[in-house]
Amino acid sequence: PLLLRVKGTLMCEEYDERHELRVMNCAGGMQAAESFDEYMQVVVGEIVALRDAVLMFFPPDPAESEGNNDHVLLSLWHEGLRSVLAHLGVPWPLGEALECVDIRDFDGLDDDRDAVADIDTWQILHDAMDRLTERCMGNTIDTYKLLGAPHEADGTVETHQDGLCWAVAVEGKFEQDFGKECDPEYEPPLPVWGRGSLGQNY
């Protein structure tokens, strides 16, 4: 199965955890994801469906100010996003990061469902981790990073004192020294599993 592995030390707690990444099939059951690209396409597809529902069923109230409408919209979005991610069972730290996806990330996305498949899911996750880092700045956890190391996906969660690595791979395909050394200054090249930029191809 495809696994998300989290390994290291964070806030004096040791981690070496494995979470199977599963997606919903056409029959409504859960099955192992074949790749991280497929997993993210399914998760982001569900997030886009939430976005469509929020915009359809809660249009702006002309009697309210733009600020009030935005407040209601974002409140509904964040509440719905947490529910979607919980329903899909997205594990930490991916789930926590994806809670920072902004509904405006999908501005310009029309009703063409083929366009959803062209969304750059890597960029969506990258931007969400940047927002989570900004939100956490000054707190115990300082940075969330998406890297481009040997696995299907790699990242780090770091504090001033310690940190951990996370990676996605098939069991048995994790690097032998995974999680033992994590250099926060390392800036590898971008991974290649994204599918093109948001706003293109439609």
Image: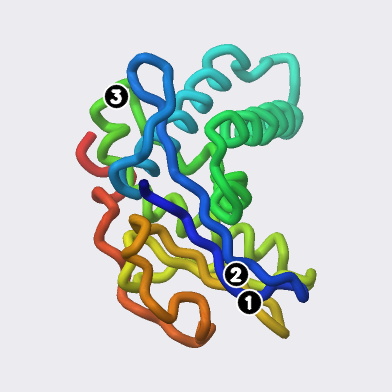
Dot 3: few (<14), some (14–19), or many (≥20) neighbours within 10 Å? few
* Quadrant of the drawing holding the C terminus: top left
CB within 8 Å, label 2 to label 1: yes
| Mark 2: secondary structure | strand
Give above or below for 151 relative to 49.
below
CB within 8 Å, label 2 to label 3: no
**Badge 2 or badge 3: first in the primary sequence:** 3
Q: Which residue appears at 35% of the width and 49% of the height?
A: 36
Disc number placed over residue 113 in the picture, else none? 3
Disc number placed over residue 163 in the picture, else none? 1
Q: Is residue 67 visible?
A: yes
Disc number placed over residue 157 in the picture, else none? 2
Q: Amino acid at mark 3?
A: Arg
Q: Amino acid at mark 2?
A: Val
Disc number placed over residue 151 in the picture, else none? none
The coloring applied to the image is: rainbow
Q: Nearer the viewer, mark 2 or mark 3?
A: 2
Q: Amino acid at mark 1?
A: Gly
| Mark 3: secondary structure | helix
